[in-house]
């Protein structure tokens, strides 16, 4: 019988490892979460004791297992046009400021999960260009990054089943931007795929190699990190943003007490942050 118990000492070691490796801070009593998230991995690799998995990953003996554990412990919940207001503000407030610029418009979806966010950004760009055919003469480049290799593979594949398609995507957008590939699965059209590239990135690592951006979506990921780590990441994002650059956080996330590099722009129905 597999032993999924985790003693207090192992739990503390595992929590330290997870925060060190990917920034995620587990609360005091989240042993059940570790048990339930790692059970499938124990079955897959034939581990009898959860403490053996903890030992392996804490000592970083096997990089493959470490990546799988990080994948299992991250929350990948996402949907199309999440919260709708960020996309509305882009089309109404932010894109008009950049639409005549000769250089490419550069957008970064940090922590892009399975791709719904960067592809929603691409659809918003294409819809804007239908209204303003000469917009963005220098082109638009969207970069999606995530720590999870499994999520990045899904992003690159760009094919979504009927359950994920039902979350936030109108019938009209399905018709315009997707091709059917059978069994209720739709794949994003090449027109969208061409605009978006994907790359592995741990937000704990320096980000200067990504270049500079005009718009950053860093939504529903900082919520898992410590205040110190949030501050560090926000300061790095500020340094990658161009003049008049805009940052969107998740609807329940706030920058209060974490950074002085941004102005809060309230713009009903939502808000965003502009670089000072
Ligand atoms: C809840 S999803 C958010 C997806 C999308 N931004 C949204 O708002 O719908 C959080 C994502 O953050 C990623 N993540 C967690 N820790 C990370 C880290 N240290 N660096 C980069 N991505 C990370 C996870 O793999 C997951 O895909």
Image (cartoon, grey):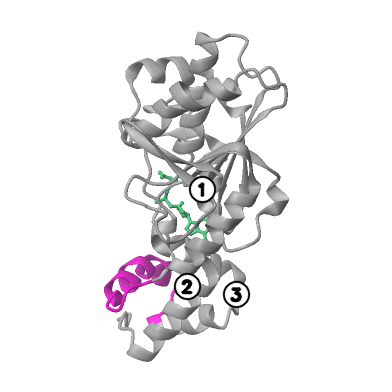
Which numbered marker is on residue 62?
Answer: 3
Q: Are marks 2 and 1 in contact (CB under 8 Å)?
A: no
Of residues 113 and 157, the one drawn nearer to the viewer in this rendering: 113
* Residue shown at 45% from the left, 84% from the top: 13
Quarter of the image for the N terminus: give it: bottom left
Sequence-wise first label, 3 or 2: 2
Asked whether, in this view, residue 223 is left or right of residue 132, the answer is: left
Residue 149, given in percent of the width and then of the height, sits at: 56, 53
Residue 264, given in percent of the width and then of the height, sits at: 43, 43
Of circles 3 and 2, which is in front? 2
* Residue shown at 40% from the left, 50% from the top: 220
Quarter of the image for the C terminus: give it: top right
Q: Which residues are magenta?
A: 26-50
Disc 3 packing (10 Å; few <14; some 14–19; many ≥20): few
Query: What is the number of callouts on the image?
Result: 3
Q: Is residue 105 visible?
A: yes
Q: Secondary structure at mark 1?
A: strand
Judge whether residue 32 is colored magenta: yes
Q: Spatial distance from mark 3 to mark 2, Cα to Cα?
A: 15 Å
The picture quadrant where one finds residue 245 is: top right
Q: Secondary structure at mark 2?
A: helix
Residue at mark 2: 18
Kindly tell me whether mark 3's CB lies below 8 Å from ligand 1. no
Which numbered marker is on residue 262?
Answer: 1
Q: For the stretch drawn in magenta, what is the main secondary structure?
A: helix
């Amino acid at each position: 019988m597999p032993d999924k118990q985790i003693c207090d000492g192992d739990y503390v070691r595992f929590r330290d490892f997870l925060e060190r490796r990917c920034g995620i801070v587990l609360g005091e009593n989240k042993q059940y979460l570790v048990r339930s998230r790692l059970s499938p991995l124990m079955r897959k690799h034939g581990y009898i004791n959860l403490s053996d998995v903890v030992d392996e990953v804490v000592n970083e003996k096997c990089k493959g297992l470490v990546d799988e554990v990080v994948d299992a412990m991250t929350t990948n919940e996402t949907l199309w046009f999440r919260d709708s207001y960020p996309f509305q503000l882009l089309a109404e407030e932010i894109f008009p400021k950049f639409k005549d610029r000769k250089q490419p418009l550069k957008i970064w979806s940090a922590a892009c999960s399975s791709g719904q966010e960067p592809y929603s950004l691409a659809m918003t760009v294409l819809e804007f260009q239908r209204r303003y055919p000469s917009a963005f003469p220098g082109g638009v480049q969207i970069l999606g990054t995530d720590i999870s290799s499994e999520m990045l593979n899904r992003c690159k594949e760009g094919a979504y089943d009927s359950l994920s398609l039902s979350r936030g995507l109108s019938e009209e957008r399905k018709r315009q931007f997707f091709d059917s590939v059978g069994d209720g699965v739709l794949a994003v059209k090449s027109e969208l795929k061409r605009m978006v590239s994907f790359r592995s990135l741990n937000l704990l690592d320096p980000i200067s190699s990504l270049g500079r951006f005009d718009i950053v979506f860093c939504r529903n990921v900082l919520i898992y990190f410590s205040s110190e780590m949030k501050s560090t990441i926000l300061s790095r994002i500020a340094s990658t943003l161009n003049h008049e650059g805009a940052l969107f956080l998740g609807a329940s996330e706030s920058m209060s007490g974490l950074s002085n590099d941004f102005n809060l722009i309230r713009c009903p129905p939502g808000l965003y942050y502009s670089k000072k």
